[in-house]
Structures are given as structure tokens and as C-alpha cells.
């Protein structure tokens, strides 16, 4: 998304209290943080905005993603990270699903 003016950006910042970011390709590419990411995240936090991180990568745990954030020197709390596998497990737990899956 491009903003036509500084006023457009300021309007977005004023309008939204929670910002959600994908990880791979948005915050980093491989093992490199994308330029401006650290500053943007810090600016949002300085303005009291909630920042969350989502990924559809179901192969890694939230702890693995937390380690990647730490390795890239991006200060993020574990509770701010939501992977597709974590979200699916949380949903199943919330609806009382307790059966084990089996290959058939």
C-alpha cells in the first residue's frame, strides 16, 4: 500500500490500534531484516499500538519463530506470534476437541 501524503499515513495510524504483519517477505527475507522494519515497529509501539505477527508456516513452533525474531534482533514477545498450527490447535482446544488423529 502506498500513501499519497503524510496525512494519509497519519490517518491510518490514528484509525487503527492493532497492526498485524506477516513474517517472511514482509519483515524479513531469508536471514535479512527488510529495510525500515525495525523503525516501523518501534514507531508503532511508541504510539501505543498493539503489534501482532502471523504466518501460515505450520512447520515451526512459536518458540522457533521467537528465536528467529531474536536472531534478527527484532524485539517480539512470544504472545505476539501466531502461526497457522498454533491457531488451529488453540481453536480445537477452545471447542473441546480432544481426540487424537490417526492416519487411515
Image (cartoon, rainbow, N blue to C red):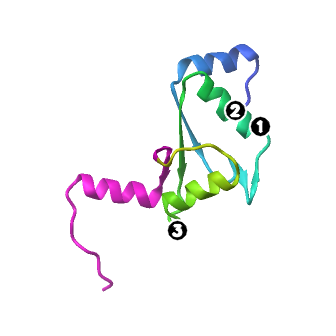
- Assign the N terminus to one quadrant of the image: top right
Q: How dense is the environment of label 3, judged by Cα within 10 Å: few (below 14), some, or many (20 and up)?
A: few
The quarter holding residue 53 reads: top right
Query: SS class of the residue under badge 2?
Result: helix
Tell which of 2 and 55 is nearer to you. 55
Q: Nearer the viewer, residue 26 or 39?
A: 39
Are the two marked residues, 3 and 1, in contact with CB atoms closer than 8 angstroms? no
Q: How far, Cα to Cα, is label 2 from label 3?
A: 27 Å
Residue occupying image coordinates x 55% and y 62%: 64
- x then y, percent, for residue 44: 62, 28
Residue 80 colored in magenta in the image: yes
Determine which residue is flagged by label 3.
59
Q: Which residue is mark 2?
A: 40
User: Residue 86, position in %: x, y?
Assistant: 42, 57
Q: Earlier in the sequence, mark 2 or mark 3?
A: 2
Magenta residues span 79-104
Residue shown at the point (46%, 57%) measured from the top left: 84
User: Position of 96 compared to 31: left or right?
Assistant: left
Instruction: Indicate the secondary structure of the residue bearing disc 3.
Output: loop
Nearest to N terminus: mark 3 or mark 1? 1
Q: Which secondary structure, mark 1?
A: loop
Q: Are marks 2 and 1 in contact (CB under 8 Å)?
A: yes
**Residue wearing tag 1:** 36
Tell me: 36 left or right of 69: right
Residue 90 falls in image quadrant? bottom left
Amino acid at each position: 500500500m502506498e500513501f499519497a501524503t503524510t496525512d494519509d499515513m497519519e490517518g491510518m495510524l490514528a484509525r487503527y490500534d492493532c497492526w498485524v504483519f506477516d513474517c517472511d517477505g514482509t519483515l524479513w527475507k531469508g536471514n535479512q531484516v527488510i529495510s525500515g522494519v525495525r523503525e516501523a515497529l518501534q514507531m508503532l509501539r511508541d504510539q501505543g499500538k498493539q503489534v501482532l505477527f502471523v504466518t501460515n508456516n505450520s512447520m515451526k513452533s512459536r518458540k522457533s519463530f521467537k528465536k528467529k525474531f531474536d536472531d534478527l534482533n527484532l524485539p517480539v514477545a512470544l504472545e505476539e506470534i501466531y502461526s497457522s498450527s498454533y491457531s488451529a490447535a488453540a481453536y480445537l482446544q477452545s471447542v473441546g476437541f480432544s481426540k487424537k488423529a490417526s492416519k487411515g
